[in-house]
Image (cartoon, rainbow, N blue to C red):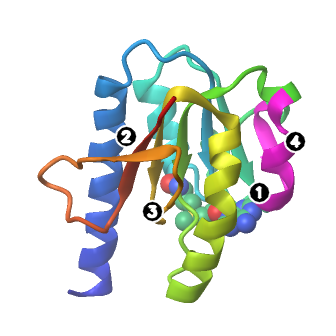
Amino acid sequence: MSRLESFINRMTAQKILLEHVAEVIGDVTGPILELGLGNGRTYDHLRQIFPGCEIFAFDRVLVAHPACIPDAHHMIFGEIRETLAFCAPRIGGPAAFVHCDLGSGDPTMDLATGAWLAPMIVQVLQPGGHVLSGLELGHDSLETLALPPQIRPGRYFHYRKTG
Ligand SMILES: C[S@@+](CC[C@H](N)C(=O)[O-])C[C@H]1O[C@@H](n2cnc3c(N)ncnc32)[C@H](O)[C@@H]1O
């Protein structure tokens, strides 16, 4: 598969999965956390498909398209490993949905990131809250959910917090 095909597949999977979560999340309440604002593409899609929901974006740099930059209150700058544990007063309550797009392309780095990230996400997530992640996040409190049939297993991961 060429890198172009892989990029298209990743973007397509993100769109399908974000819309899938919007359909299945039901009445779970709370803000949405976008871990890795990047260019702001998925942030912009989240705004469109979750109208009226508060969305907080996290990144260590600001490289987003000018039309996709959250206001200062909703943009949390810095290393997610440092900021996520301390965001509770700012986000105002446990999150309903965390979208995590932090893959580095290096399998060892991605394993290391998943190991510190999973317990931190569990801490900020509402019981019954959903997680979509490009990285596998193993944690006892995260139940793995089936992906829509169009998504190749292992490309993305969908979890729900138990309890
Ligand atoms: C793949 S991009 C996100 C793309 C975005 N979802 C979009 O649709 O445009 C990943 C982003 O995560 C940020 N990032 C990766 N690891 C991070 C970390 N540990 N702390 C803060 N930001 C991080 C990078 O700076 C980068 O902007």
Choose the circle earlier in sequence order: 1 or 3: 1
Q: Where residue 90 sits in the image (x, y, percent)?
A: 85, 28
Q: Which residue is mark 4?
A: 86
Q: Is residue 101 above or below residue 55?
A: below
Choose the circle earlier in sequence order: 4 or 3: 4
Choose the circle earlier in sequence order: 4 or 1: 1
Q: Which residue is mark 2?
A: 18
Q: Which residue is rendered at x = 51% and y = 60% of the image? A: 137
- Element at label 1: helix
Q: Answer left or right for 156 relative to 83.
A: left
> Label for residue 80?
1
Q: Nearer the viewer, mark 4 or mark 1?
A: 4
Q: Answer left or right for 55 relative to 60.
A: left
Tell me the crowding category of disc 2: few under 14, some 14 to 19, or many 20 or more residues within 10 angstroms, Cα based.
some
Cα separation between marks 1 and 2: 21 Å
Q: Which residue is mark 3?
A: 134
Rendered image quadrant of residue 72: top right
- Element at label 4: helix
Q: Main secondary structure of the magenta part?
A: helix
The magenta segment is: 74-88
Tell me the crowding category of disc 4: few under 14, some 14 to 19, or many 20 or more residues within 10 angstroms, Cα based.
few
Q: Which residue is rendered at x = 77% and y = 27% of the image? A: 91
